[in-house]
Amino acid sequence: MVYGSNEPTSTVDTPGLGLFELPAALVKPAVMACRLFNTVLDSIFYDVPTLRADLRRHDAEMAKQDEKPPSRIVAFDALTDPEGSLLLIDATTAPYVHRYHDVEAFLNSPYQETRDVAVATITGVGSSALGSAALAWDVSVALGAPVLAIVPGYGVADVVLQGLGGFFGFGLFDYLGAKSMTQNALANVAPVTATIGRQLAASVPDATTLHGAPVFRHGSGSSDVLHALMKERAKPFSIVVGHSKGALQIGNALRSLDPDRTQGLRVVTLGCPIAEDAPGAVYHQYLGLFDALGQLNMWGHWPEYWPPTWHTTNSGLPPAMDAGAFTRDAV
């Protein structure tokens, strides 16, 4: 089920900057192609086979009851769409997946489950809805509770950083604030292009814009979204789970929150330890003994646990991190 529109809702008024814009008909397919490449990576780093199998089984059960299968997140258009979204996933209750394209729409939703969900996840490597859903599904199955997956939007700034090696050196790029600087530069010279893939971040209450294009307050669109949800919800999340670059995005999101918003929060990181600096939060950080990518991006932050795993959470590629079990152990 889908709530909120995926179409841009604002216009960009930038006299004199039109000469720097690239045709959207050329830019968006290129960004979609990069997103599709990252979807292939999702199938390596996240337990996509289990997600597909479980959804097929649930869809078959619903079809027997003459109900429309809800698992549209595995459709081709969702995998290549550069825009981010919020996926409310409950592995225990049909229809299992709700999708929101607007942060304010989620915050103002009349549905009780949007107010009750206490767990949030963020994936890395520019993940599509598929990878984000797979991680959230693992956690939801393990906890027997709903999980909100924040699907990172994927824009031109991400394409630039990936071309510069940001996937393999995301710790360095996070330290330098490279994504934020790239997005700001795009907003200055090509604001229409800078809006591609950023509609979710633009829907954050009081979002910062430059020439009408969204720019980041906390280093990335996902960080801005999590920060807003932690700040604006009546009851903040009690557990946040980040894998790979998603852990860095969680760290950025929590950094400037009021202490009452992070008191008692459990932060679970997989494959990328972060600074433990959120007031009152309890950290459970896992870094695999064979995880060369995660160890490359430690930046002096040591995990509490060293399981004999590598970077993936895909159970079909052992020795994999068991994201669900690690989160369950943390709570």
Image: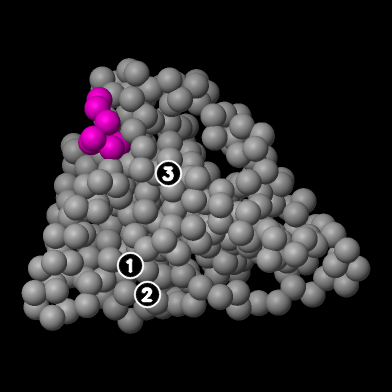
| Residue at figure coordinates x 74%, y 73% from the top left | 12
**Where's residue 209, x and y in %?**
70, 64
- Image quadrant occupied by the C terminus: top left
**Where's residue 232, x and y in %?**
45, 66
| Residue assigned mark 1 | 72
- Measured in 3D between alpha carbons, the distance from the residue under mark 1 to the one under mark 3, in whole angstroms, is 18 Å
| Residue at figure coordinates x 22%, y 77% from the top left | 68
Q: Which mark is residue 173?
A: none
Q: Residue furthest right?
A: 16
**Where's residue 240, x and y in %?**
35, 48
| Residue at figure coordinates x 63%, y 46% from the top left | 159
| Residue assigned mark 2 | 2
Neighbours of disc 1 within 10 Å: few (<14), some (14-19), many (20+): some
In the image, is 36 to the left or to the right of 30? left
Labels 1 and 3: the sequence-earlier one: 3
| Residue at figure coordinates x 71%, y 47% from the top left | 182
Residue 315: within the magenta?
yes
Neighbours of disc 2 within 10 Å: few (<14), some (14-19), many (20+): some
Q: Quadrant of residue 199?
A: bottom right
Q: Which residues are magenta?
A: 313-319
Q: Secondary structure at mark 2?
A: strand
Neighbours of disc 3 within 10 Å: few (<14), some (14-19), many (20+): some
- Image quadrant occupied by the N terminus: bottom left
Of 93 and 41, nearer the camera is 41
| Residue assigned mark 3 | 40
Query: Three-letter amino acid code at disc 2?
Result: Val
For discs 2 and 3, the disc positioned in front in the rendered view: 3
